[in-house]
Image: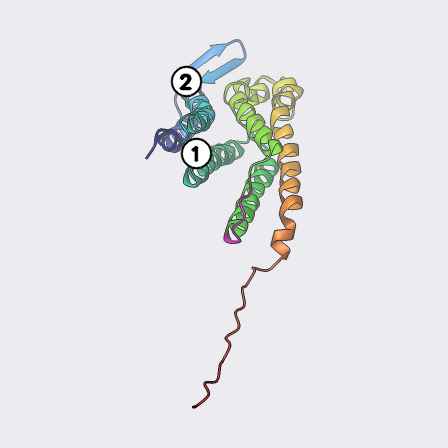
């Protein structure tokens, strides 16, 4: 396994550590006024940032070292999807990210992966477009932000300050990168299908060969 793929593997191995830290109930917290950040979430956020940065490092190294492979692209994509979607699902479970937003993002990724596999069966490679790359960047940034400044860290519901509760202004501002992620996600999906729908409608090319029969004349 080359270096870029090894970095992708490390990203996958970080996922269960991040999820456990998100779900564990530790008493230790960093407190400043009404802001309270559990140490477990601080560590989870740090590991998530490391995993997110590794996504750009492995791609850079693959190009720099001339180690770009079909398997590497597939493995990198799987690592990204596992990281972001698993964190999204846990954040929805904890009522940090709206569940409808998570469902749309996860289903979009599933449909795009299905489209990529169908096209691959027709010997067509679907390259990532810039809208998809911007979507990934906003998603990584948005999730990182939620690790450190989600509404639950301000405990607005308990203090009676509606400004900081789940539907308060502060939380909606913090969720803006995720709303932008949703918009870019849907738009990039539309672009993928628009550019490749003709491959879906066309059947596989079949080569037909005719066998010619020749009669031998008897002499």
Instruction: Classify residue 63 by image quadrant.
Output: top left
Position of residue 190 measured from the top left corner of the image (x, y, whole percent): 66, 42
State which quarter of the image contains the N terminus: top left
> Residue drawn 56% across and 25% down?
142
Vertical comparison of 21 with 85: above or below? above
- Give the SS element for disc 1: loop
What is the residue that sits farthest to the bottom in this orientation?
219
Give the main secondary structure, helix, strand or loop, of the magenta stretch.
Answer: loop
Mark before the other along the chain sequence, 1 or 2 = 2
> Residue drawn 45% across and 85% down?
216
Q: How crowded is mark 1: few (under 14 residues within 10 Å), some or many (20 or more)?
A: some
> Residue drawn 47% across and 25% down?
56
Q: Give the range drawn in magenta.
A: 121-126
Is 186 on the left or on the right of 27, as rendered? right
Q: Which of 18 and 217 is in front in this view?
A: 217
Vertical comparison of 127 with 63: above or below? below
């Amino acid at each position: 396994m080359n270096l870029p793929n090894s970095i992708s593997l490390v990203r996958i191995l970080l996922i269960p550590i991040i999820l456990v830290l998100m779900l564990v109930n530790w008493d230790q917290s960093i407190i400043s006024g009404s802001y309270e950040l559990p140490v477990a979430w601080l560590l989870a956020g740090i590991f998530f940032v490391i995993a997110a940065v590794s996504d750009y490092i492995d791609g850079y190294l693959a190009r720099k070292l001339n180690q770009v492979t079909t398997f590497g692209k597939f493995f990198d994509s799987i690592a990204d999807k596992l990281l972001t979607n698993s964190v999204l699902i846990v954040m929805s479970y904890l009522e940090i990210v709206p569940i409808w937003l998570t469902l749309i993002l996860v289903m979009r990724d599933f449909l795009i992966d299905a489209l990529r596999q169908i096209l691959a069966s027709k010997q067509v490679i679907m390259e990532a477009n810039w809208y998809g790359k911007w979507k990934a960047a906003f998603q990584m940034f948005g999730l990182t932000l939620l690790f450190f400044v989600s509404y639950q860290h301000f405990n607005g519901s308990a203090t009676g300050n509606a400004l900081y509760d789940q539907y308060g202004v502060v939380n909606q501002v913090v969720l803006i990168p995720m709303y932008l992620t949703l918009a870019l996600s849907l738009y990039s999906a539309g672009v993928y299908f628009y550019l490749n729908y003709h491959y879906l409608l066309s059947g596989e090319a079949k080569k037909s060969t005719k066998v010619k029969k020749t009669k031998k004349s008897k002499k």
